Amino acid sequence: MKRPQAQVAVLQAADAQEDRRIDDVAAEADLKPEAATRAAFELEADGLVSVSEETLEHYELTDEGDRYVRESLPEQDLYEAAIDAGAADGPVQMGQVIGASGLEGGAVDIALSNYARKAYGSIDSGEITANQDADPGSDPEMLALEAVADRRVDDADTDALDQLERRGLLDVREETVRSVQLTDDGVTALMEGVEAAETVDQLTPEMLTSGEWEDVAFTEYNVEADAEDVSHGKEHILRQTANRVKDTLVGMGFSEMEGPHADAQFWINDCLFMPQDHPARTHWDQFALAEPEEIGHLPPDLVERVRSAHKEGVGPDGEGYHSPWTEDIARGMDLRGHTTSLSMRYLSGHQVGELDPPERYFSVEKVYRNDTLDPTHLLEFFQIEGWVMAEELSVRDLMGTFTEFYEQFGITDLEFKPHYNPYTEPSFELFGTHPETGEVVEVGNSGIFRDEVLTPLGVDCDVMAWGLSLERLLMLMYGFEDIRDVHGTLCDLELLRETEVIR
Ligand code: PHE
């Protein structure tokens, strides 16, 4: 049988009776450990060797652990000073004992907490006692420290080792060690004779210029072989999914909206028929800007129509709020709490000119809310905004659009719940089922804009609209439970690294 040189070397170095470490095999076969590992996996795939794996733990003292093993543990010093001060016979002033112990700075706290934990004595309202029966001389943590320092880890107590790691006195590093052993087939192959085939595993410029590449046999790649994980930079799954959402909506005939993150309350709230004394318009919910305090320009005729909708309502039977409405409030600047502000700008005709139905627009952009941080809420998140303008629209169109959209992301169990929004009637919240917890999670809010919104904007056909959470969509797709797994400093790096890219 002919085999690549590295495989032959590994076969010959491996043993049928016992596992041999790949590192040892590599040294004997004069191969790099990676090359020997690769060859071993190739041989394993053909049943000629078996590869086993074992995780070894290496213990190493930290600088602090090293200092203690050469001197003593702070709690041992404290005990000694306490005994000298007579604390075995009754409580003694703590200050006096600490002074005598020579402990300083952070070491004092370390000594006190471990002293109490190990029941060397008790500490109460500034006084310390020492337990006569305690035996700091054979402190298990000190013994374990010494065992690690002397490379006798096997002698050390495992609880004590854990405790030392928690105290930061010990670093534990895990190493995966692989071993090979010849199988029966491997033994047979060796007996029948294995020869090294001249194979080339790297194409060089010289081989290309000389033409030698035409005559050589190249090593086969085993793309299924285990390889070391390399974590490299990659597109964040939130960004990936945002781009997928955009592609999906463009595929469904939508165009993208753009607009300011900080905007006038007029576009964020007033156009949406949200009364100026609505609770969601207070600083409890939204972030106001000090600078600039107000927007430079608002279209005067639109302002007038919105004001009149708020005061008197629209149409012959219209009812307004009859509550105060001032342009000053409408001009105030906020970070947008939803991207429905963009929908208002576009529907008003002030962003891209007058629109002719049918029209479809979307955005996937950040919004900002003064929420309380918890596993499903952040102060900023991405909203998938969208609307469809057409002559006749019904709730079925809305449901159909969502069903089609979410299907693209593997979500087929949408549920709808009637809801209230000041700007849509009817309104629906959307829910999906979390793949891990089975909980029903709200993923979005939607509805058909009411006349009080559309008439001032000058739109005289139907418009259905929605705001969906990108992060919640991600939760349903990937099964994580905390929004902070994908945002901010606490994010789950493993999730971000290992989530497959889907296109
Ligand atoms: N603005 C709503 C929200 O942020 C979403 C929405 C947009 C609902 C458009 C209806 C129509 O929850």
Image (tube, helix red, strand yellow):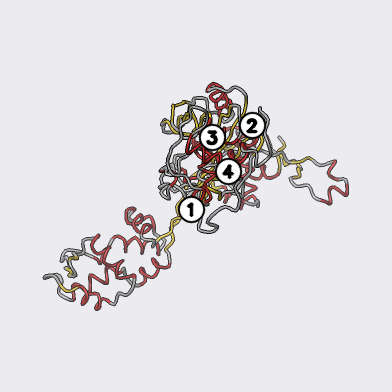
Q: Look at the numbered disc 3 and say if its residue's Cβ is closer than 8 Å to ligand 1.
A: no
Bin the neighbour count of mark 4 within 10 Å (Cα to Cα): few under 14, some 14-19, many 20 and up: some
**Front position among marks 1 and 3:** 3
Bin the neighbour count of mark 1 within 10 Å (Cα to Cα): few under 14, some 14-19, many 20 and up: many
Q: In the rendered view, does 443 fall on the left or right side of 228?
A: left
Q: In the rendered view, does 165 fall on the left or right side of 456?
A: left
Q: Which residue is mark 4?
A: 365
Numbered circles on residues, count? 4
Q: Residue at x 62, y 26 (%)?
A: 390
Bin the neighbour count of mark 2 within 10 Å (Cα to Cα): few under 14, some 14-19, many 20 and up: many
Vertical side of 468 occupied by 484: above or below: below
For marks 2 and 1, the one nearer the N-term is: 1
Q: Secondary structure under badge 2?
A: strand
Please name whichever residue, 445 or 102, is drawn nearer the observer in this view of the structure.
445
**Front position among marks 3 and 2:** 3
**Front position among marks 2 and 1:** 1
Q: Which residue is mark 2?
A: 360
What is the distance, in whole Å, between disc 4 and disc 2 at their CAs?
17 Å
Residue type highlighted by circle 2: Arg
What is the distance, in whole Å, between disc 1 and disc 4 at their CAs?
19 Å
Residue type highlighted by circle 4: Glu
State the image coordinates of residue 442 (x, y, percent, origin top left): 45, 33
Please name whichever residue, 347 or 160, is drawn nearer the observer in this view of the structure.
347
Q: Which residue is mark 1?
A: 288
For marks 1 and 4, the one nearer the N-term is: 1
Residue type highlighted by circle 1: Ala
Q: Which residue is mark 3?
A: 453
Residue type highlighted by circle 3: Val
Marks 4 & 2, CB-CB < 8 Å contact:
no
